[in-house]
Image: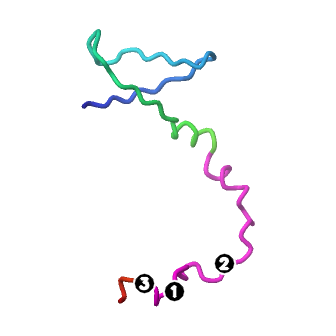
């Protein structure tokens, strides 16, 4: 199975139009629709997206401490 990536804009009625597909007339195809993450990132730069989290962590004692006690690790037994 070959995959082709085409970007499109959702129209006011909720439809999309795909033109110039590399398939012959009458060919059966499967369509999967995904959010275009790259356009969302462009609309919300990382600095703005994470700004609401700034100052939300007031204390972080041991970031590398395991939530599972070492004696419970099967790999060490």
Tag 3 residue: 73
Answer with mark 3 or mark 2, whichever residue precedes in sequence: 2
Q: How many marks?
A: 3
Residue labelled with disc 2: 60
Q: Residues within 10 Å of mark 2 (few under 14, many from 20)?
A: few
Q: Secondary structure at mark 3?
A: loop
Apparent side of residue 39 relative to residue 3 in the rendered image (left or right): right
Q: Position of residue 3 (x, y in %)?
A: 31, 31
Horizontal and vertical percent for residue 46?
61, 51
Question: Element type at marker 2?
Answer: loop
What residue do we see at 63% from left, 43% from top?
Answer: 44
Q: Secondary structure at mark 1?
A: loop
Horizontally, residue 40 falls left or right of residue 32, namely: right
Magenta-tinted stretch: 45-72
Relative to 69, say whether 23 is above or below. Answer: above
| Nearer to us in this view, 36 or 51 | 36
Classify residue 30 by image quadrant. Answer: top left
Q: CA distance from mark 2 to mark 1?
A: 19 Å
Please identify the quadrant where the N terminus is shown.
Answer: top left
Of the residues tagged 3 and 2, which is closer to the observer?
A: 3
- What is the number of the mark on residue 31? none
């Amino acid at each position: 199975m070959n995959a082709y990536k085409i970007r499109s804009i959702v129209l006011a009625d909720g439809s999309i139009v795909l033109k110039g597909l590399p398939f012959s007339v009458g060919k059966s195809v499967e369509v999967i629709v995904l959010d275009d993450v790259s356009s969302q990132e462009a609309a919300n730069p990382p600095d703005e997206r994470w700004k609401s989290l700034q100052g939300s962590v007031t204390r972080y004692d041991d970031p590398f401490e395991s939530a599972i006690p070492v004696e419970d690790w099967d790999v060490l037994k």
